Image (cartoon, grey):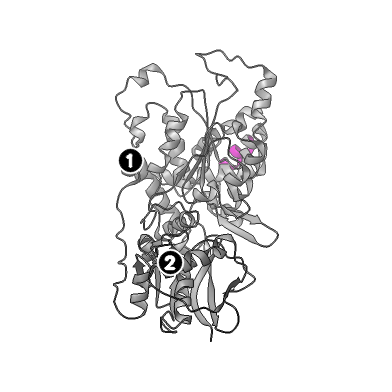
């Protein structure tokens, strides 16, 4: 009679249950067959498992072995099937009780000596096991803290196959992995960065504060050395801490991508990703022959920083449109379609021209008008429309460089951001949104009502600057955030004026 052991396979950042069945027939010539759309690493598990069983002192009888991974129409990949396969073989051979693994989920890679090695995606597997009311999950010891983040599920961390056999046969008992203690480090304490180190640039700091308070995308435009990268790297220090559900989702992504630090439990600080401009479409968005999360998903609930934005290939920049609009990425393949979360805050930086000194009073621009036009045309209008705040960052005057430290630090900025976020949380308590950057449709109209004077001001700005409907929406969202930072429920003309002033590239295009 076949022996069944429960495990799971990854699909995107989530897992679906897999039933590993083993039939051991003593009739016929000895053989080993694995079916159920097993990819290369899964098929190779046969050699690893048989060697691990031999080196741990377990001897299988000569038999015709058939392994099925159900459902058979879903592709399985990776090395996490080693442990469930070894346990199923031992149970089919009578070395373990047939019901030893009933109600348990198993996952882990085996070395040839029988040691258990960590595998990616354990958090997703544990989450699926809890949903299916499993009585526990057996994982490598290095994965135990990660799996223990999923509460109300006993997690047993194992060092090797021999320990797994002793536990399943009842020869020894194991204590479940305790729930990891949350880390209380503040974002700036963890990174060692602070806005007090940025001298001058008060206008840019104000823009960062508005962007962080409302979850808006942000672009810095200025000459080399004006502090654009320095400002961008400090953006995470003013963002609110991750909620538990956000941290769980971010950790799932890093776990599936195999980038979760060893023996880590939960990612509790917002990600900051800064890919090089030579990155490919698949590297930024995700994909490949075996789809993996891209940089936009690795920056989920955090910051994606694109330095020297026009240097990125135009095709790479254009694929940013969907995640900027929808907060997710869909990767379609012939056999399947995967959706990865990609709800990030985009921070970008660029020079105003190829040499970088267009409009700088201290340096002469050496670029010809056609060069400037070609450089600026690398950024399409639809892409720029999706970036809410477009801020000019001029060179810092010497008298400001002489200051020892800026009076505006990350702690004070974060406090104002948190206060504004609390106002938004109360306003959107009954809605599936959290920040002003997500406002749209009737809710945008309801939350961004303008007085007659405000309508006249905005109408004049739209006509004068030739703004698109998307830019009009962005201005309303920014003005709503500015009002929240000022503690006002009503949007005033001064809030609209500041919002329009933060659309610098619109003003340049109009000029």
Residue 28 counted in the magenta span: no
Packing grade of label 2 (10 A; few <14, some 14-19, many >=20) is: many
In the rendered image, the quadrant that contains the C terminus is top right
Image side of residue 235 versus residue 471, left or right? left
Q: Nearer the viewer, mark 1 or mark 2?
A: 2
What predominant SS class does the magenta segment belong to?
A: helix
Determine the residue positioned at 45% across, 69% down.
83
Determine the residue positioned at 38% across, 63% down.
115
Check the image and report above or below for 200 versus 212. Answer: above
| Front residue of 437 and 461 | 437
At mark 1, the secondary structure is helix
At mark 2, the secondary structure is helix
Packing grade of label 1 (10 A; few <14, some 14-19, many >=20) is: few
Query: Which label belongs to residue 412?
Result: 1
Whether residue 130 can be seen here: no
Determine the residue positioned at 50% across, 51% down.
300
- What's the magenta region? 454-460
| Alpha-carbon span between mark 1 and mark 2 | 57 Å
């Amino acid at each position: 009679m076949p022996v069944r052991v429960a495990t799971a396979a990854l699909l995107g950042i989530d897992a679906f249950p897999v039933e590993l069945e083993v039939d051991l027939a003593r009739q016929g010539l000895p053989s080993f067959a694995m079916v159920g759309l097993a990819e290369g690493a899964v098929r190779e598990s046969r050699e690893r498992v048989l060697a691990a069983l031999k080196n741990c002192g377990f001897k299988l009888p000569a038999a015709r072995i058939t392994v099925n991974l159900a459902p058979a129409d879903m592709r399985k990949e990776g090395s996490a099937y080693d442990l469930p396969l070894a346990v199923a073989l031992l149970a089919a051979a009578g070395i373990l009780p047939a019901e030893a693994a009933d109600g348990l989920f198993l996952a882990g890679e085996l070395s040839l000596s029988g040691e258990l090695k960590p595998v990616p995606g354990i958090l997703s597997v544990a989450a699926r096991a809890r949903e299916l009311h499993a009585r526990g999950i057996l994982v490598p010891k290095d994965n135990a803290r990660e799996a223990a983040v999923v509460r109300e599920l006993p997690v047993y961390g194992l060092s090797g196959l021999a320990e797994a056999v002793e536990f399943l046969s009842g020869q020894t008992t194991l204590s479940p992995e305790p729930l990891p203690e949350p880390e209380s480090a503040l974002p700036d304490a963890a990174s060692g960065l602070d806005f007090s180190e940025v001298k001058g640039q008060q206008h840019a700091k104000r823009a960062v504060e508005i962007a962080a308070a409302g979850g808006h995308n942000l672009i810095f435009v200025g000459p080399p050395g004006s502090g654009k990268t320095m400002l961008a790297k400090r953006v995470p220090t003013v963002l609110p801490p991750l909620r538990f559900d956000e941290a769980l989702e971010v950790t799932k992504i890093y776990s599936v991508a195999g980038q979760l630090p060893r023996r880590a439990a939960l990612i509790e600080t917002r990600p900051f990703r800064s890919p090089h401009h030579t990155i490919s479409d698949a590297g930024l968005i995700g994909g490949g022959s075996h789809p993996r999360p891209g940089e936009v998903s690795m920056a989920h609930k955090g910051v994606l920083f694109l330095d020297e934005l026009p240097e990125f290939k135009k095709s790479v920049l254009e694929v940013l449109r969907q995640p900027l609009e929808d907060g997710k990425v869909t990767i379609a393949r012939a056999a399947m379609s995967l959706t990865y979360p990609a709800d990030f805050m985009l921070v970008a930086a660029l020079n105003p021209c190829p040499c970088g000194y267009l409009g700088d009073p201290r340096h002469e621009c050496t670029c010809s008008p056609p060069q400037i036009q070609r450089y600026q045309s690398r950024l399409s209008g639809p892409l720029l429309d999706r970036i809410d705040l477009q801020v000019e960052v001029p060179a810092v005057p010497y008298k400001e460089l002489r200051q020892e430290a800026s009076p505006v630090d990350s702690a004070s900025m974060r406090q104002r951001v948190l206060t504004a976020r609390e106002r938004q949380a109360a306003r959107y308590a009954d809605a599936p949104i959290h920040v002003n950057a997500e406002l749209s449709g009737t809710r945008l109209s309801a939350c961004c009502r303008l007085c007659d004077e405000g309508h006249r001001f905005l109408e004049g700005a739209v006509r004068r600057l030739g703004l698109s409907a998307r830019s009009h929406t962005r201005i309303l969202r920014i003005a709503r955030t500015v009002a929240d930072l000022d503690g006002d429920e009503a949007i005033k003309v001064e809030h609209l004026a500041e919002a329009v002033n933060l659309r610098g590239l619109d003003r340049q295009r109009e000029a």
